[in-house]
Amino acid sequence: MSNRRILIAGNWKMNCLTTDGTALATAIAGKLREASSSNCDVLMAPPFTLLSTIKNALGNSEVLLSAQDCHFEASGAHTGDISPVMLKDIGCDYVILGHSERRTNHGESDELVRQKAELAIEKGLKVIICVGETEGERETGKTLDVVNSQLTGSIPANATADNCVIAYEPVWAIGTGKTATTDDVAEVHKEIRSHLAHIKSQDLADSMRILYGGSVNPSNSKELLSLEDVDGALIGGASLKADDFWTIIGHWI
Ligand code: PGA
């Protein structure tokens, strides 16, 4: 039994667009407060414009606040970009980096993800680094090679088990309702942990959290998160409904 604490992370993406999103945050924070103790960390990643509002709505709750991206430089001529210094200042605990939607839609490379992560950590944030294969890569048997290579290229040099979390998200499972089988998830998570030992150290590999993401929902979350090397979930769709998100969290209360 590992002593890695489960992390349940909700990635709102470009949803919950207005201050209406506070109802979701308030509902989860309230339920967590009512629960006398919890065996998991809970995190919410709203869009940039809502970070401050959600921070206020969360009040003194234990729910962690995360952004969904940041720039690789602290300041400068970068129109439209957000610095990790700004995120830290506004009260963020975490930033998600290298999500497949950013890798695909914004052409983000492993190198860029690594640079962003190193600066974010330097500025006091914790990072969630996403990796995962496409359907074509899985079908041609390249899953483990792709994931290992993304991990090697994206993991920040200053990563520790405390400031860095890995999220394995098969691209074909994101937002599609298709989930990887428990055997597939177990295989990739085990490989990620052994690759971490290879490129970093056995200590780091044993203590770093590895989340699964891709159509996690109230019905499949318990089984997925009970796998030996799965230390939590990064959840899109099901994190947008308070009841669904709470059901997933509720397994660990
Ligand atoms: P999903 O998204 O749960 O809607 O599949 C997961 C993610 O993209 O982080």
Image (tube, helix red, strand yellow):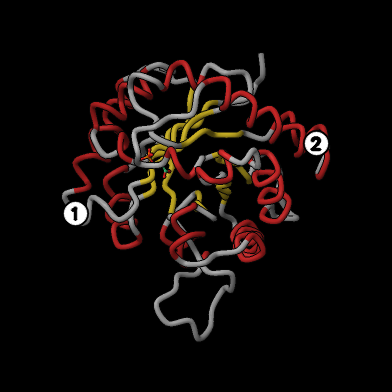
Q: Is residue 77 above or below residue 66?
A: below
Residue position marked by numbered label 1 in the rendering:
19
Residue at the spot 57% in from the left edge and 39% down from the top edge: 138
Mark drawn on residue 46? none
Is the residue marked 2 within 8 Å of ligand 1, measured from its CB? no
- Quadrant the N terminus occupies: top right
Mark drawn on residue 197? 2
SS of the residue at dot 2? helix
- Quadrant the C terminus occupies: top left
Residue at the spot 66% in from the left edge and 51% down from the top edge: 150
Q: Label 1: few (<14), some or many (≥20) within 10 Å?
A: few
Q: In x, y percent, where is residue 66?
A: 44, 50
Q: Nearer the viewer, residue 191 or 85?
A: 191
Name the quadrant where ligand 1 sits.
top left
Q: Is residue 243 left or right of residue 79?
A: left
Real-space CA distance between mark 2 and mark 1, rounded to the nearest whole angstrom: 43 Å
